[in-house]
Image: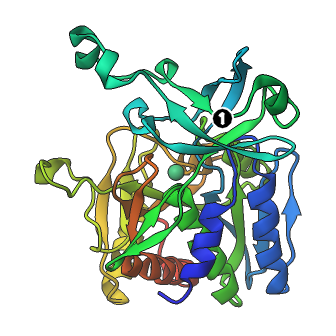
Amino acid sequence: MKNIELLSKICSVAGAPGHEKKIRDFIIGEIKKEGLGYTLDNLGNLIVKIKGKKEKSIMVAAHMDEIGFIVKHIDEKGFVFFHPLGGFDPKTLTSQRVVIHGTHDVLGVMGSKPIHIMSAEDRKKTPKIEDYFIDTGLKKEELEKKISVGDPITRYSELIELGQNINGKSLDNRASVYVLLQLLKKIKQPPYDIYGVFTVQEEVGLRGASAASLLINPDFGFGLDTTIAFDTPGSAKKDQVSQLGNGPCIKIMDSQTICDYRMVNYMKEISKVKKIKTQLEILPAGATDTSPLQRMNSGGSIAGAISIPTRHIHQTIEMVNKSDLSNTILFLYECLMEIDTYDWSH
Ligand SMILES: [Zn+2]
């Protein structure tokens, strides 16, 4: 994988749901470098159109938001209470560092009750989001000069390389943001118009993709997101969903989408003909932008999704594999370039 530095930057820029300006501006910078045009819609989706040879449209969506929090209350001692933006597993918050994005960025740590003073009863319970608070080390008066209720909060962790894998926060879904950016740089004269959309507010209910899909009204849709790779100790093969390093996943279904059978067959065909190793994904819980891509437009679209296997998902230490990333770019490219050669009538 060539561009670890770019991916690292993409993961580091903040973008809690509804507060995507910083990451959007960063992506716009990358798009401008390539001389590509773009538009923004009212909700904040960033849309890059590549003109195709024929009159049909394909929407490819990668959400640019990341799970985060929002400041709810600052108490008299300066401790910060918060509300989650997206599906956090509370146990993963213990002793994590976070950044509160106010007029200044303020670093803080997630505090909770020390084990020494927990009752036997307490120790048996799984923690709840409400058990945590953020300690910034600052007094209320000092803190309120920098942050206030409603400011977004994101996780703090650097991207590192571990063997052939990459590890850090926000790989869900910045890994796909990276893939879509590389794709837009690479693709020239596709058969149909391509709308590459960096969507907002996916983590709180697929909200950005809904507005963008209504606007674009695509004939075909490709969701780009991460999926679970539970190929770790203690997992049964039937529950793994995907395995790290075994290639991009062709989504068959998730909790809100049954991918179009024609799209699934088409993707399998591309995988075979172009000799790109893929996996088949059935995700029992969790949804992606594929759902609004497929249904939130007049008459629907022929939609499917490519998912990137991800270990430790929705934690601060998400992990993807380098060859999975480069093969995802390649696979998506081939799926877009061959789309007019397939018989979609049955
Ligand atoms: Zn995601």
In the image, 72 versus 185, the foreground residue is 72
Provide the residue designation for mark 1.
Answer: 137
Mark 1, other Cα within 10 Å: few <14 / some 14–19 / many ≥20 = some
Kindly indicate the quadrant of the structure image that contains residue 328: bottom left
Q: Coloured how?
A: rainbow
In the image, 120 versus 84, the foreground residue is 120
Residue 346 appears in the figure: no
Residue 194 appears in the figure: yes
Q: Residue at x 46, y 50 (%)?
A: 316
Image coords of residue 61 (percent x, y) = 63, 60
In the image, 346 versus 129, the foreground residue is 129
Image coords of residue 69 (percent x, y) = 63, 34
Q: Which residue is drawn at 43% across and 53% down?
A: 259
272 sits left or right of 22 in the view: left
Q: Which residue is drawn at 21% across and 11% down?
A: 120
Q: What residue type is labelled 1?
A: Gly
231 sits left or right of 281 in the view: left
Q: Is mark 1 within 8 Å of ligand 1?
A: no
